[in-house]
Amino acid sequence: MSKKILITGASSGIGRALAYELAGRGYALALTARRLDALEEIREDLKTRHPSATVVVHPLDVVAYDTVPGVIAACAEDLGGLDILFANAGISRGEKVGQGRFDKARLTIETNLLGAMAAIDAAVAYFLEQGNGHVVGVASFTSFRGMPRMASYCASKAGLVLYLESLRAEVYRKNIHVTVLNPGYIDTPLNDMLKSRPFLVSAEKGAAMIAGMIEKKVKSSTVPVWPWCILGPLLRWLPTRVIAQF
């Protein structure tokens, strides 16, 4: 029986690439994002490539918190169950602190942290009722250390890591697995405006790595593992004068 996964933020970037990767592996997919038209195009393309694939789409804005449980429930109903939540919806506005852009900082926190929490909370309620499940949260290598011009983004991803670690302790022995992913630079619209993206990998390659990690139910990993498994933690030890140059 195919695994059933719900992907938030599936209209572009990592979410979109993972949908294609998992469709090829025989997964049943529920794709959500704000742009229904983009989701429908992806569904049609996936069905062309994989005629037997199960692909359902639902519009979802994760910051419309009250609507999230209903969408999660609708996806589970359409798929005939739900095994995995891939909490991926996220944004980056690159705002500086003290420059009159708090509205952008607030939206980043609301989307990346509170929106992810809303989706995870609804999915975990479903998983607790059925007695099993798997939550996969997409954080970032920036969760290891606050970076200049990325304060709210770093805070949102660090907060998500701690939230997921707390969740793992809460559902211990409840047959619910929790995976925390900290991607490095994966080629997506979220970062394609940056001048420097060291150790960049394509979205397709990143998605293949992530799919493998999901299937192994890893607890936590950088993506790719190397060199970010070394570079991420190393960021914590760099002096501020070095971090300020980034």
Image (cartoon, helix red, strand yellow):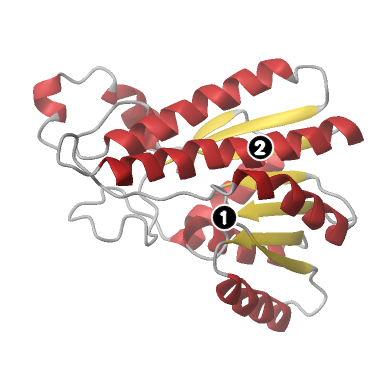
Judged from the image, the secondary structure of the residue bearing numbered disc 2 is: helix
Cβ–Cβ under 8 Å for marks 2 and 1:
no
Quadrant holding the N terminus:
bottom right
Mark 2 is surrounded, within 10 Å at the Cα level, by few (under 14), some (14 to 19) or many (20 or more) other residues, namely many
Can residue 33 be seen at all in this image of the molecule? Answer: yes
Can residue 131 be seen at all in this image of the molecule? Answer: no
Residue 208 place in picture, x, y as percent: 57, 55
Q: Residue at x 75, y 67 (%)?
A: 56
**Precedes in sequence: disc 2 or disc 1:** 1
- Who is closer to the viewer here, 18 or 70? 70
Report which residue position mark 1 lands on.
Answer: 61
In the rendered image of this protein, does residue 108 appear above or below residue 191? above
Q: Residue at x 66, y 43 (%)?
A: 214
Residue type at numbered disc 2: Ile
Report which residue position mark 2 lands on.
Answer: 120
In the rendered image of this protein, does residue 33 appear above or below residue 236? below
Residue 47 place in picture, x, y as percent: 73, 79
Quadrant holding the C terminus:
top left
Horizontally, residue 162 falls left or right of residue 157, namely right
Camera-near label (2 vs 1) is 1
Residue type at numbered disc 1: Asp
